[in-house]
Amino acid sequence: SEKSLKEVVGDKFLMGVALNVRQSSGMDTSALKIVKQHFNAIVAENCMKSEEIQPKEGEFHFEDADRLVQFGLDNGLTVTGHCLIWHSQLPDWFCVDDKGKNVSPEVLKQRMKTHIQTVVGRYKGKIKGWDVVNEAIVEDGSYRKSKFYEILGEEFIPLAFQYAHEADPDAELYYNDYGMDVPGRRDGVVKLVRSLKEKGLRIDAVGMQGHMGMDYPDIRQFEKSMLAFAATGVKVMITEWDMSALPTAMRSANVSDTVAFKKALNPYPEALPDSVSQVWNERMQQFFQLFEKHADIVERVTAWGVTDGDSWKNDFPIRGRKDYPLLFDRNYQPKDFVRKMIEEASDS
Ligand code: G3I
């Protein structure tokens, strides 16, 4: 009989997927069918971010997150929390006062502590692990000059890990970032993981987001980073996997000509040409094989959305373009490379 994706992967690693609010609220039943059939891990695409879950100080909105966690528990899926401390999707009140002035280090620490402990505490024992800090290291390996960094310096990261651990000592804790193939960032993240470990703090894995394109990242550089992170003694996770099928047009488009610009950014509004689709599928398969090759260090691979229609890539960098970055198409059908893997595994 025909296998599912999670059966193909077997016990190599968890096969995860990010759910949007339409999905976690049960509205998108076709997508949920795919989730239950093919995946064994879920993560919230947006509803656990600080702006969503604590839009005003002390005002927590748990409804969407509660539903997502319950869906996971009901269906035996591993649930990951995303994310506790991130400079983006961060409500203004968190780091600045009414006049736009940075709050004091003491106030920010208290707010981080309350935020983290309230959110982590609510799902204690239900969520396997948390993306504790997201996107804090830039390409040259230094710290991103975020509000957290401005106010607390490097210390905000160990503090976040400490607060999360206090709230749920059994939960796994992750550092998550993008562009992890870049050597400078790789080194910066390795340094960060080592320093957390030296402080005696818990860190279980490094999450490599894995937002890819047809010409980036270089697969060898990506592999090098996987190995470098694993060498620090943590697991590796591919946390936000997708691959834009569109050319990297930002660099070449003439931005002053809006029509040409939009066309360059949305070159396949009807369908992806077969020739492009073939290259895309081959490249996805290569990365998948890389993850399988390193199954001893890869703990989970998570697609950043269920179908192409759900992807954030359709709105980035401009709204309303049409991209084809995920494992299932807009008709809820598996992409060729997924179908092929399933067929091969089902034969054997
Ligand atoms: O909440 C409003 C909603 O009320 C409104 O109807 C809608 C229409 O404009 O906008 C909604 O918010 C949007 C939200 O997605 C939900 O659709 C935000 O404007 C939009 O910025 C947000 O984008 C998300 C983005 O993170 C920023 O938080 C993407 O869906 C999500 O895929 C993306 O995910 C991030 C990871 O968390 C971290 N790594 C990078 C990755 C891609 O940017």
Image: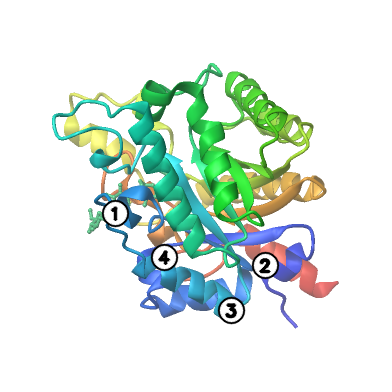
Mark 2 or mark 4, whichever is nearer to me:
4
Give the percent coordinates (x, y) of residue 210: 56, 42
Res. 58 mark: 1
Q: Where is 2 relative to 88, above or below? A: below
**Tag 4: residue type?**
Ala
Mark 4 and mark 3 residues within 8 Å of each other at the beta carbon: no
Q: Who comes first in sequence, dot 4 or dot 1?
A: 1
Q: Secondary structure at mark 4?
A: helix
Quarter where residue 254 is shown: top left
| Label 2 Cα neighbours within 10 Å, binned few <14 / some 14-19 / many ≥20 | many
Q: Who comes first in sequence, dot 1 or dot 2?
A: 2
Give the percent coordinates (x, y) of residue 310: 39, 60
Res. 5 mark: 2
User: Where is mark 3, residue-wise?
Assistant: 75
User: Where is mark 4, residue-wise?
Assistant: 65
Disc 1: residue Cβ within 8 A of ligand 1's nearest atom: no
Mark 2 or mark 3, whichever is nearer to me:
3
**Tag 1: residue type?**
Gly
Q: Where is 33 relative to 322, above or below? A: below
**Tag 2: residue type?**
Leu
Quarter where residue 34 is shown: bottom right
Q: Where is 314 relative to 125, above or below? A: above
